[in-house]
Image: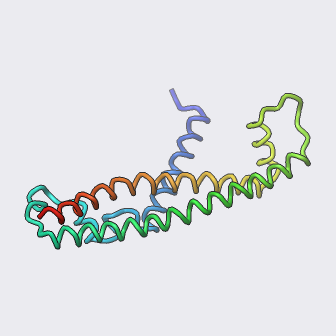
């Protein structure tokens, strides 16, 4: 059996989202393999290599990772600010449009939002910006935590050697 039109549409939306995230990762150097070889090296030591690190080397690698985390955090903060701005602008426009739009009786809030987005392209664009920004913030959040753990391990290693 063939897939329904709705299933194909969902697959296209997900493919578009994957493409957006992949392009964002590459453009903003979130992919460690392509951004900085020394950071990538610092995150991929074998057990033997960790044992052979001097305390100065471990501290240097911890510092490299922390510097990279700082860059990612800065980008995440900018994206969070973008999300908050778009969210506030969306809410302002949505309320303004709600007052200028008539809805059928017993229309759900989600349906009202969709009607407004269909009727007012700027509101729809703000909703799209919010969705993308929220997704990008999640992308950063899930990258930073493991990096922090690795940097802390290397820092502790430098202290005990």
Count numbered badges in the picture.
Answer: 0
Q: Position of residue 8 (x, y in %)?
A: 56, 39
User: For this rendering, which residue is in front, 52 or 113?
Assistant: 52
* Rendered location of residue 157, percent (x, y): 17, 61
Task: Kindly identify the residue that appears in the image at 40 percent across and 63 percent down.
Answer: 30
Q: Position of residue 56 (x, y in %)?
A: 17, 73
**In this rendering, would 35 be left or right of 101?**
left
Q: Tell me which corner region of the image, top left, top right, bottom left or bottom right, holds residue 93.
A: bottom right
Q: Residue at x 85, y 28 (%)?
A: 106
Q: Which quadrant, please, contains the C terminus?
A: bottom left
Please identify the residue farthest to the front as the structure is shown. Answer: 160
Q: Is residue 136 above or below residue 29?
A: above
Residue 10: which quarter of the image?
top right
Q: Who is closer to the viewer here, 6 or 34?
A: 34
Left or right position of 140 against 153: right
Looking at the image, which residue is at 12% across and 67% down?
53
Q: Residue at x 37, y 54 (%)?
A: 145
Nearer to me, 19 or 64? 64
Compared to residue 60, the image places residue 114 above or below, namely: above
Q: Specify the color scheme.
A: rainbow
Residue 30 vs 17, above or below: the answer is below
Please state the horizontal and vertical placement of residue 92, each as a whole percent of the image. Answer: 79, 55
Instruction: Say which quarter of the image contains residue 38.
Output: bottom left
């Amino acid at each position: 059996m063939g897939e329904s039109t709705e299933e194909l549409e969902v697959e296209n939306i997900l493919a578009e989202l994957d493409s957006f995230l992949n392009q964002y990762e590459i453009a903003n150097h979130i992919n460690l393999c392509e951004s900085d070889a020394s950071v990538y090296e610092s995150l991929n030591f074998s057990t033997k290599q960790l044992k052979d690190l001097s305390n100065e080397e471990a501290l240097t690698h911890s510092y490299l990772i922390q510097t990279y985390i700082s860059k990612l955090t800065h980008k995440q903060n900018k994206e969070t600010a973008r999300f908050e701005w778009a969210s506030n602008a969306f809410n302002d426009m949505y309320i303004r449009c709600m007052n200028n739009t008539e809805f059928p009786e017993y229309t759900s809030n989600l349906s009202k939002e969709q009607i407004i987005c269909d009727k007012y392209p700027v509101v729809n664009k703000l909703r799209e910006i919010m969705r993308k920004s929220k997704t990008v913030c999640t992308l950063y959040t899930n990258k930073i935590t493991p990096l922090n753990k690795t940097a802390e391990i290397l820092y502790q290693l430098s202290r005990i050697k």
